[in-house]
Image (spheres, rainbow, N blue to C red):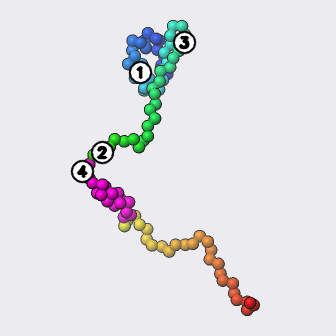
């Protein structure tokens, strides 16, 4: 973290702010010994906040494209194999003749 005097920071404010944005923090020290830290404000935003895109597609066409993209392709499918049960099969008890 770089330290500037109050006079330097006042004369080079744009440089101080640019460095704070690059480095994260910049310290400014006054003559009386007090120190201040300048740091950029972190804007909390969603990664899903994206600008809209205008197209000539209709809603029906967009939905058809989405459905087509979700459909499995032939090369992605695995060959058919019988499903194996996780539980072992129980054998039937032999008839004893008693009711």
**Residue ID for mark 4:** 56
Name which residue lies at 42% across and 41% down. Answer: 47
Q: In this view, does 35 lie above or below 47?
A: above
Q: In this view, does 75 lie to the left or right of 29?
A: left
Name which residue lies at 65% across and 78% down. Answer: 90
Q: Element type at marker 2? A: loop
Camera-nearest label, 1 or 2: 2
Camera-nearest label, 2 or 3: 2
Q: In this view, does 56 lie above or below 41?
A: below
Provide residue 44's location: percent of width, then percent of height. Answer: 46, 35
Q: Between marks 4 and 1, how big is the CA–CA gap?
A: 43 Å
Q: Going by the picture, which residue comes out furthest to the bottom?
A: 97
Q: Between marks 4 and 2, how big is the CA–CA gap?
A: 10 Å
Q: Between marks 3 and 4, how big is the CA–CA gap?
A: 60 Å
**Residue ID for mark 1:** 17
Q: Earlier in the sequence, mark 3 or mark 4?
A: 3
Q: What stretch is highlighted in magenta?
A: 55-73
Q: Element type at marker 1? A: helix
Q: Element type at marker 4? A: loop
Q: Residue 34 carries which label?
A: 3
Q: Between marks 3 and 1, how big is the CA–CA gap?
A: 19 Å
């Amino acid at each position: 973290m770089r330290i500037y005097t109050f006079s330097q920071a006042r004369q080079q404010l744009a440089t101080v702010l640019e460095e704070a944005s690059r480095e994260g923090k910049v310290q400014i020290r006054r003559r009386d010994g007090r120190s201040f830290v300048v740091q950029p404000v972190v804007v909390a935003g969603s990664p899903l906040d994206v600008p809209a895109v205008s197209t000539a597609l209709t809603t029906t066409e967009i939905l058809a494209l989405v459905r087509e993209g979700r459909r499995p392709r032939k090369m992605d499918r695995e060959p058919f194999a019988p499903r194996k049960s996780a539980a072992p099969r129980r054998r039937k008890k032999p008839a004893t003749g008693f009711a």
